[in-house]
Amino acid sequence: MIRPDGSVTTPYKHYQTWFNAQDPARLHSKSQEAEAFFRRTGITFNVYGEADAQERLIPFDLVPRILSHREWSRLSKGIEQRVRAINAFIWDIYNRQEILRAGRIPKELIAHNDAFLPQMMRFTPPGNVYTHIVGTDIVRTGDGDFFVLEDNARTPSGVSYMLENRETMLQMFPELFARIRVQPVSDYPKNLRRSLAACAPQACEGKPRVAVLTPGIHNSAYFEHSFLADQMGAELVEGHDLRVVDGRIAMRTTQGYRVVDVLYRRIDDDFLDPLNFNPDSLLGVPGIMDVYRAGGITIANAPGAGIADDKAIYSYMPDIVEFYTGEKAILKNVETHRCAEPEALKYVLDNLAELVVKEVHGSGGYGMLVGPAASKKELAAFRDKLQANPGNYIAQPTLSLSTVPIFVDQGLAPRHVDLRPFVLVSPQGVNITPGGLTRVALTEGSLVVNSSQGGGTKDTWVLED
Amino acid sequence: MLGKTAGGLYWMFRFLERSENTARLLEAGFRMALTRSSDAESEWKSVVTTSGAGAGYAQKYDSYSDTLVMDWLLRDPDNPSSVISVTSSARDNARLVRTALTTEVWEAVNDNWMTLRDLLKEPITTVDLPGVLATVRQQSALVRGALYGTMLRNDIYDFARIGTFIERADNTARIIDVKYYTLLPSALAVGSSLDNVQWEMILRSVSAHRCFRWLDETDMTATAIADFLIFDKRLPRSLAFCVKQTTENLRYLEQEYQERHPCHDLADRLKRWVASTDIDMVFDLGLHEVITEFIRDNNALSAQIEQDFRFMA
């Protein structure tokens, strides 16, 4: 928002004028108001592994993160290109495997990958869509370049916060929206429903019935599951509400079993079907994979789609984009060292204190090492883990990330952020909601934005042209 | 609607109703103990028995006192019917059926839980009790108001109402059952001050001590009170009233779903029983026997509803 020379960046100009005219005491009380609103509405999450299973709030910062129309249009073009390439890639992996035969990606990377599901081989999902919902994690460096950090192609979460953050801002500062023209995000649930319905399976008769599959009220993202079902007018089901009836998936209603056409599942592949995957799973539906392969139901996102958002595959994304679209990737990848490769491993071990090291299949900020912030002891411990199983890790340089202002006791202060725009894919096209979820590291200097590690969120504005 | 959702609504409103009933029962017991200090222990014991959580209490404590009973009924997580337990169960069920609730109803239930959780964090003293009980009543009035004011009158509403009235009928019947001996028209104790206090306690625990005086010009007698609690269709906590409401909401479901179930027959049987019986017949058959049978029938109706509407797989 503020350049080193003290001038204000263009997208923030009008906001800055408004902000300077505010009474700081009023803003502080608004900040507390927002917290009460989140508690009352029940926008809380549970943290795994905490003994008392307390419901926690994700801290909300009332200064919006603002992107210009031009910045957004470049960003969204890049995301669309990437998401189209990802879908083509997944189809290819589960069908012809041309990219492997062309030698652009090592075969072992697929063959030894836990996210690869043999059950998906030689099968094309309804509408040829694998990643119905994608949440692409974007960071920006000091000089304004966008980098993709992660392609979340399984079950990205956080979209309810995008919607509720905007709702909160509209309630607290209606005058701001009268003054500054911000592109709306409220169409997301409607678009999600439309997008899912457009992927209805062959067997669907009439208007497609959509349901959201949740692990239940104790899941950390349960609020989001119920929120999305509610906003879409879809049923919110658990595994024990569903079963196979006459070759279709049906849910138990007060009037008997009723067919479901599209299942937006918020459980992992492994738990989806105890007959085909993890036999101990109580969360899934026995036999759903067989119904799926027979064209009786659409599962969103498709099982096995995780093959595309693996952190080892990530390093090949520029090649993947080029291979399937014939174009250069618009969005940059962060330089990635694959520790499976001996030379890379040597480099990583030599420069551990400067690098961020992540588990290939990890998520949520767990199991990662932020070199510059780690103690000598932590570095040594991680060094051992790396050497024991190098294939499990990748390493990236710490980028000089850009900052955005947050509201603190002393006024405004810069903090590091990332951005997760939400992308919908259907045979009708790719739809990206302008904005997304901005996560912010609340501790000064910190690079970890995950809510499970104390990060916060803020509203994200894309300005009208 | 999902069977699970119907079940969630039904139990959510049973739990909400129970929290209010427990608060009312405690209030009546408290008043009773103030009036008659000599036999406070046995009064507190009957309060615990009426609440339906007597067995758990007896496992934990050897004696009955205001402090222990208040703690057990208000804030003990070991008691599944304590106000804090049922408030939290009601909210869990509300989360489960969130997509079936208006924002107003959800927020009222959530607020109810947050308020009572804070209020009941520390043990309650007798000085604080009236204020705490007032809050419990007020909170459930807010939930009920949100339900009346904002929910569509469809199957969602029907399951919410059925849960409310099945629970309420059970509660009133248990109050009568525990105190049935004071309602017997015995020649010995007629008009004694002992009876008056007992009857006042019964009426208070269904919030009907003032209504009774408005409606009944005759003196307070055991028969009149029993008649009032069982058969008076004007009293929203009488067995007759609860049966009428349950039957009605079940009939709406029958119309909406175009399907009649065994639970409809069970409910109609209860309704016919109410219509064809009067208080003299009840005393002829034995008040205790009649009420015990009612509680059993009401439970059977509840189980049948759960089965007919597929609450569980």
Image (cartoon, coloured by chain):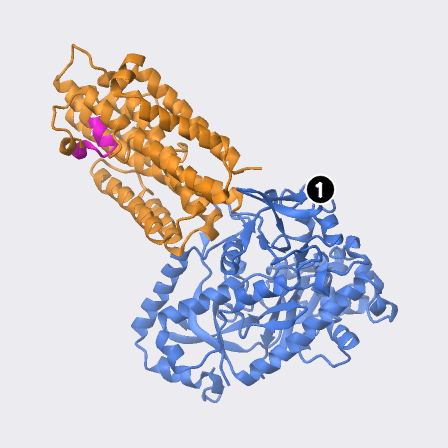
Chain colours: A blue, B orange
Q: Residue furthest top?
A: B188
Q: Quadrant of residue B186?
A: top left
| B208 within the magenta span | yes
- The image position of residue A286, as x and y in percent, is 69, 43
- The image position of residue B270, as x and y in percent, is 38, 26
Q: Quadrant of residue A398?
A: bottom right
- The image position of residue A152, as x and y in percent, is 64, 64
In this rendering, is residue B185 above or below A422? above
Instruction: Please provide the residue range marked out in magenta.
Output: B201-211
Quadrant of the frame with the C terminus of chain B: top right
**Amino acid type, mark 1:** Pro
Give the secondary structure at mark 1.
loop
Q: Is residue A243 visible?
A: yes
Q: Quadrant of residue A394?
A: bottom right
| A356 within the magenta span | no
Foreground pick, B20 / B225: B225
In this rendering, is residue B174 above or below B251? above
Instruction: Write the residue at 14% across / 34% down.
Output: B214
| Residue tagged 1 | A279
Q: Is residue A401 left or right of residue B141?
A: right
Q: Is residue B201 left or right of residue A159?
A: left
